[in-house]
Image: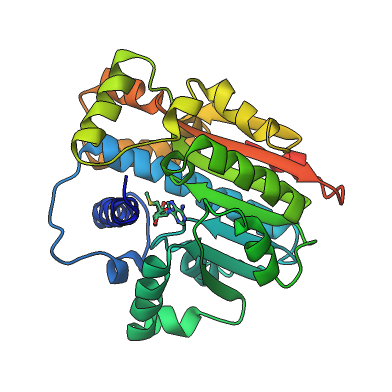
Amino acid sequence: MSDSTIIETNSDATGAKRYAVDRGYWSDPFIRYFSSRLDKGRRTVILSRRYFTRVHTFFTQAVAFCSKFQGKCNIVSLGAGFDTLYWRLKANGTTFSQFVEVDFKEVILHKAEIVKRHRPLHDLQGDDYTAMSHDLRAEDAAASIRAAVTDPSLPTLIMTECVLVYMPPNDSHRLIAAMAEAFPTSIWLDYEPINATDSFGQMMVHNLKARGCELPGIHASPTVAAHSRRFEDSGYEHATAVDLNHAYQLIPADERRRIQRLEFLDELEEWTLINSHYCCTTACVDAANAGLQHLLL
Ligand code: SAM
């Protein structure tokens, strides 16, 4: 799979987020600056609910993490794409010492150009924001990211939202292990498709392949437990993983009721089946005994 096809997945994610935001799944006044006006495609209810679960989980985990350390902490978003979390946290009054976004050069430059053109983005962006281009598959990725962080000994939240799956398992193993050493007090929050073993999973992989999109990382995680073991095998001390059915249940009931009223969903079985092919993982190393284990999902 070429790098440009991997980069394209960022447009898919941004378009799907914009579609769900426009339908009221969550509030994000910044996503419209990043999505293409030409993208008018409909998205399924199942897709919007899946994005809602993923965005809700990442936002609440980030807010809980920053509150616990009263802003004396870092967030490092690997394969950040056009994600707007930095701006949503700033608008929410959530503070952190540094927020670092890493992606391919093309994505980082394009994002910087968009921020420059739109005042609401530009005005919120402060000295606490760093964008860096780096191939996460490269051997020196973790060392370069560490060098870009002013204080890597601070508690650090590392995020990968649909990123590791595009990396060969050997490269993601090396990245996770090196990040655990580079950031000895860190918690990793990851969202990925898993489980390509059953017929639905095989069909999902086949359909993506037909569109030129391969998922080299998916076969490394046949189950939720296998996916969390990848973090434990790569130097993280504790890891927990839940599939998306479980992650959805962790969202407060009134919020789930609100979501379920937005768009009617008849295919509940299909929704449950698809959710079982995605998982949210948290893993931590805690050299400073900062109590990171309490933040695991
Ligand atoms: N995390 C963002 C989100 O959820 O909106 C973007 C997700 S998009 C599916 C995957 C992102 O990971 C893309 O922006 C892609 O360029 C980036 N990515 C994948 N492999 C990468 C690599 N080896 N090095 C740097 N970035 C990578």
Residue 246 vertical position relative to residue 138 in the rendered view, above or below: above
Q: Is residue 277 left or right of residue 152?
A: left
Q: Is residue 261 left or right of residue 194?
A: left
Near-viewer residue (136 or 77): 136
Q: Quadrant of residue 215?
A: top left
Residue 97 in sight here: no
* Residue ranking furthest to the front: 139
The structure residue drawn at horizontal position 72% and vertical position 63%, both measured from the top left corner, is: 73
Near-viewer residue (175 or 278): 175
Marks counted in the figure total 0
Residue 152, position as x, y percentages in the image: 75, 63
Residue 41, position as x, y percentages in the image: 13, 51
Q: Is residue 86 left or right of residue 24?
A: right
Q: Quadrant of residue 227?
A: top right
Residue 98, position as x, y percentages in the image: 65, 70
Residue 283, position as x, y percentages in the image: 67, 38
Residue 230 vertical position relative to residue 223 in the rendered view, above or below: below
The structure residue drawn at horizontal position 28% and vertical position 51%, both measured from the top left corner, is: 5
Near-viewer residue (5 or 204): 5
Q: Is residue 176 left or right of residue 262?
A: right
Q: Quadrant of residue 93?
A: bottom right
Residue 143 vertical position relative to residue 47 in the rendered view, above or below: below
